[in-house]
Image: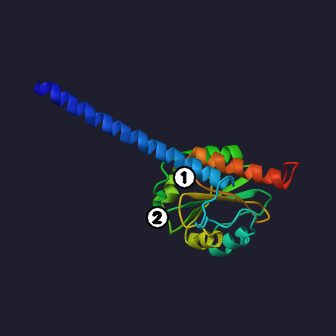
Amino acid sequence: MTGFWLASYLTLWLFVLLQALLLLALIRHIGNLRLWLRQAGVIRDMGVAEEGVSVGTTVENLTDLVQSKSNLSLHEDHRAKMLLFVPAGFFGCDELLPSLKEFEEQYGDILQLIIVSFEPAVEDQFEVVKRMGIRAPIITEHGWKIAQVCQVVSAPYAMIVDWQNVVRSKLPVGDAQGLEELVQVYYRGVNSFNPAGGE
């Protein structure tokens, strides 16, 4: 009889743990869906300040800002710039980093990826990027200034700014799917701005 009660007790706890895991997965899914809908303009949080400057806003010339605040040399061209804001040490970016090389290969002709670290990066950041074959420059020493101009306070967060320094899309990103959603929002914004689909 004791064995029966023990098995029943363990089964009950396994059921409780399973329910907790399912609840966490559901909450995460709802959160991701809400962020996507908010970015797409379908919903809006009342009384909550949205992160990042508004889509359609012109910001300071980022190329000039980067060149004046770091030793990086960014070439001025007609590609849009995707600013990827990350915490020092890439904390919380484990699912995001492996997808950046593929992202560069897929969208490198239209988007220049720039990694912006909120705080001065440790040497490991450069080693990780190099080891993964990511070509994007890392803004470190004055990344906080770019974040201030773009009004971004959390990471990982991404923003696409076109060659005229107009913010076209922005979204918290944590993996390849988040990057893809950001680009799709960018395409929808560009196409609505120019019905021909060009910049």
Which residue appears at 53% of the width and 67% of the height? 118
Residue 93 drawn at (x, y percent)? 50, 53
Quarter where residue 80 is shown: bottom right
Q: Residues within 10 Å of mark 1 (few under 14, many from 20)?
A: few
Q: Secondary structure at mark 1?
A: helix
Tag 1: residue type? Lys
Residue 165 drawn at (x, y percent)? 76, 66
Q: Secondary structure at mark 2?
A: loop
Tag 2: residue type? Val
Q: Quadrant of the N terminus?
A: top left
Q: Are marks 1 and 2 in contact (CB under 8 Å)?
A: no
Q: Circle 1 is placed at which residue position?
A: 130
In the displayed structure image, the side of residue 36 where residue 186 appears, left or right: right
Residue 6 drawn at (x, y percent)? 16, 30
Residue 72 drawn at (x, y percent)? 64, 67
**In the rendered view, would you say 125 is above or below 27?**
below
In the displayed structure image, the side of residue 93 where residue 139 appears, left or right: right
Could you say which is closer to the camera, residue 103 or residue 14?
A: 14
Which residue appears at 58% of the width and 69% of the height? 143
Could you say which is closer to the camera, residue 141 or residue 160?
A: 160
Disc assigned to residue 122: 2
Disc assigned to residue 169: none
Q: Quadrant of the C terminus?
A: bottom right
How far is disc 1 from disc 2 in space, using C-alphas? 14 Å
Which dot, 1 or 2, sits closer to the camera?
2
Q: Residues within 10 Å of mark 2 (few under 14, many from 20)?
A: few
Which residue appears at 53% of the width and 63% of the height? 154
